[in-house]
Amino acid sequence: MQSIPEIIRTIPLTNYIMLSSALFCIGILGVLTRRNAIIVFMAIELMLNAVNLLLAAFSSYYSDPSGQIFVFFIMAVAAAEVAVGLAIIVMIYRNIQSIDIGVLNKLKN
Amino acid sequence: MSLLLLIPLLPLIGFAINGLAYPKLSKSIAGIVGTIPPLVAFVISLQLFLNFDGQTQIIQLADWIKVADLSIPFAFQIDALSIMMLLVITGVGTLIHLYSMGYMAHDAGFGKFFSFLNLFIFFMLILVLGANFTVLFIGWEGVGLCSYLLIGFWNQKNSYGDAARKAFIMNRIGDLGFLVGIFLLIQEFGTTDYQTIFSTIKDGTEVGNIGLIAFCLFIGAMGKSAQIPLFTWLPDAMAGPTPVSALIHAATMVTAGIYMVIRANALFELSPEVLHFVGWIGLATALLGAAIGLFQNDIKKVLAYSTVSQLGYMFMGLGASAYTASFFHVMTHAFFKALLFLGAGSVIHAMSDEQDIRKMGGLKSKMPITYLTFLLGTIAISGIPPFAGFFSKDEILAALYHHDFAMWCLAILGSALTSFYMFRVFILTFWGDFRGTEKQAHHLHESPWSMTIPLIILAVFSVGGGLINLPHFAGGNEFLAHWLAPILPEPHEVGEVSFFSLEMGAPLVAAFLPAIFAIYYFGIQKAVPGNDESVQGIQKVIYRKFYIDEIYDFVFVRPIQVLSTFFAQVIDFLVIDLIVEGVGKTVKTASDEIRKAQTGNVGYYIFMMVLSIALILVLTLRSRIL
Amino acid sequence: MTAIIALSLFGISNLFLGFWFPRKTIQLVTLLFLVVSMALTVSDWNHELLWFGNMFRTTNTSINFSLIIQLAAFFVVAFSKAFGQDDEHTHPAEYYAIMLFSVVGAILMVSFDHMIVLFVGLEILSVAMYVLTGSDKRNLRSNEAAIKYFLMGSFTTGFLLFGITLVYGATRSFYISNIGTILTTTAPESMPSFLFIGVLLIIVGLLFKVSAAPFHFWTPDVYEGAPTIFTMFMSTIVKTASFAALFQLVSGIFGSLYTVWVLPVYFISMLTLVVGNISAVYQQSVKRMLAFSSISHAGYLILTVSSKQISTTSSILYYSLSYTLATVVAFAVLILVSEYQSARVEKPENFSSFEGLAKNNPGLALCFSISMLSLAGIPLTAGFWGKFFIFSDTFSRNIIYPVILAILMSAVGIYYYFKGIIAVYLKAGEIEKIEVPTLFKMALWACTLGTIILGIYPSLVKSVF
């Protein structure tokens, strides 16, 4: 029976980085292409999860728990952010009955 | 130490109160608020004087400027010289504040006037208390500013504003020299601290440019103390209220140049050429001032030229390295010239702002106190023993006698002129018959007590002020010389003088003869100068002040005006309109373009950010990754 | 260190006080809290210590930054008035509590010795700011500012985290001191290349917070939309804290990797100067002008880190302090002009609404002008010395062209700052006498006086820093 770090180490580190980077880029693309605030928000969460994944991978790879602890911090903070973010979106929906970020461009120049 | 800080602080507080509360404060309160600070400062100075142990004391208030290796602290220095100056400034200052309460009583800007006076006292105290040239410079500029404000105090009249501006500009020319001197000091010594600089010199360390530094500092002194060629502002400065003329343009500010040279005596001693130059400039100024004073008909103008001339004497003394004598004359001059100005002010006050002595006369009976005190002042300035002016002027003359005989002869001539024009003014004003209008005659009155008390006090000092440095031959012990000895170079040994030698006799003759002649001519013959058109020949040249203002106007002002017209019309169009405005328009257009980048769309913002990040990553890492 | 515990407790107790006391009492109590926490911060002076499992480091530099932040918070609280429409329908205690919490975040950001603390501090500050920005719930502009700030902020947080992760992957540590040791002892060639991406992404994440171009787009919109009192908060506290974090990273652990980041930072500083100053010229709204002005000031600050050797800390601290004092006054007068005039229903923020201010409100006009002069860097104000120290520091490190550009740009700055002074003094306009509350007035004069004192006598604080 192999320990988990040993199993993880059977795959080169580069692959984990590639996977996470790909997820991260998908997140970026999501933010760029979508106009619905909630979906943009989900894309941002995707970026954060890419980071989480990479952290966990590094952590296991080096047998160093601090990376995974960081993951918990990110998740906790992200949850707080979600609460605030959704509140802002709800607030906007109440005012203009829309959550299209393209509509909000009164502040400019 | 804490008491010492109060000395400059009190006038500043007075300035703040009067300045902020003006015009809500009533006149009597404003006057008291203005007069108390110099009075208390005087008491503190007196206490400092009595307890002084001869030790130079440095009071470090704060690090002020610290740039690289240069460190200029905000520090005060208490030594024999600054204590003496403190006494003169606060003492004479208090009297003049008191006097102003009477003199300015009918003026709408009463509170403003007192706040300016207090500000002046503050800066003057900073000037003499400073422990380095930089702090001195703050005071130096500050008093210049106050002088400007006070000359132009009655700014409803355009010519007064012009006079204020002229004083400011002339002073600025001098200040430029002073500033260059300070920069050179920093370059050569790495500090502007008096003690460091003077001890470096004393140690015999070779330092370059000493002559140039001394010369630059003297240019500053020339501006502030109205020496040739920067003297023409002082007579014009008489546009200000008379107490201002007495305080700033006779007793204190104009002597700042002399104070500075005495302070920097170590520097000047090392450059004999500059000292020589100082002496001759002083002599020329003394003679020119006295000559112009001969035929002036405006009572304040005569006194102004007399001040120019007396300042010339002080510089002559400095040129002969007779620092004590010069400082002695600074002090006695402060007393009798302040007295004369205040007396003149009292006359002008009584005459309803008439300043022409041809229209006065016979005021003796109407204003006995003014008459008597003015007489004492006249005797003092003429150098008639045993009044204060005699001793101080005689000491300068004695130093000159041993220094340079030709200079001494010319100085005696100047002294004779002084005696003549002072008695001329005195007799024309107070003796004979009244020559003014009916209305003025009706209005004539002795001034109120707030004006006469300062006159009386100053008269006492003008008479007895000589005691402070009474020479040995008159039974004194040369107190001032001993007092100042620690900060001055070793005096040249002068032998005992006999009362009947040429050295002693000539000044006495120069004092008495012209006075007697003036009494005969104006008093007994009752001659009165004719009106402006009747003066002819050389007299006209002198009456017109040697056309110096006109010459300056032709040599300096006109070309500058032509140049400025050229700049205004040609350069202005080419450079300002085309290039500068072009830049301005370009910036505005660019601004208009760039702000369009701020579209207000979040998606666009994020896209630009991602693009930038990608660009940064690719550009910086292309060599590392690919 | 005790300061952050105290501030957190104070924040919570503020929430409870809100049940019983009116806004004015809570405001005073909050001011008291901040004074106490400042005293606690000072008590750590000269004790370089590690706290919380070696994750939090107090040094004199971090204490100075914390003090500037708390001072700014103090003034913001002093300048605050009823939030929203009136005291009845809002819960003022919550605003003060959020402000205290965000100050905790800011302090974490200036004293971190572990990436978690940096991240948590940044998020505490940011999330609090998202809430405050959108606190004017019925106002669409406030909504828009909040969603823009929120989306862009959390988006960049992603980059920052990705950067931290990559650096962790390369060095196997989150501890700043460990990372520093590893980076200095290992040759850059033997490092995995994703380390450099990580370093750049972390720097980008922080540059966003200090609103450096081209990551500045959020700044003018968010500053304009947010209630002015919170704009004041953002432009001082968020900026100072983020710059302190950036400064500590690039001057500390990333110092040995300067070849990687120095060029981008160099160009970003110049771009920021140009964009900030040039864009400000055209602005008609004072609030938006101040937003661009804050971008340009970020440019001056970034200038100090754009070389191998970093500027002396004291210059940066001095600059932050002078900028904070002047900005606070500018926004305070803006609040007075736009919100305290009972006769006006709408809230005017244009230059034209300042016209003729000097006539009936000479004190306000004076404070405003002095703050404008300080921001423009005119002598005898703190701003002059701030710029002088930064320019001479930078110049002595042989960074010539950006300094020349910066000086040119500060000349442009004079144009738009003086527009404010001209409007106040030279234009004719009708502004009634504005009734200024005593506390407000005291804070206003304190800041103005501070600006002048620092301008006349810079060594007063420069010697402390």
Image (spheres, rainbow, N blue to C red):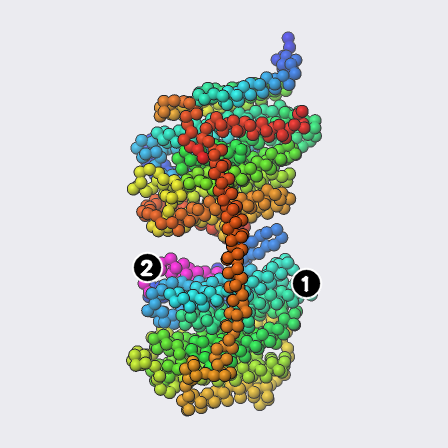
Which range of residues does the magenta coloring cover? B3-27
Q: Position of residue C148 (x, y in %)?
A: 45, 28
Q: Is residue B9 magenta?
A: yes
Position above or below: B54 against B623: below
Q: Mark 2 or mark 1: which comes first in sequence?
A: 2
State the residue position of label 2.
B24
Q: Position of residue B376 (x, y in %)?
A: 44, 82
Residue B433 image-quadrant placement: bottom left
Q: Does residue B274 appear left or right of residue B34 in this picture?
A: right
Residue behind mark 1:
B207
Provide the chain ID for the residue under circle 1: B
Label 1: how many residues lie within 10 Å, few (<14), some (14-19) or many (20+)?
A: few
Residue at 67% x, 27% y is B624
Q: Residue C10 in the image: x percent, y percent?
A: 42, 34
Disc 2 chain ID: B
Q: Amino acid at mark 1?
A: Val
Give how far apart the Cα atoms at labels 2 and 1 are. 56 Å
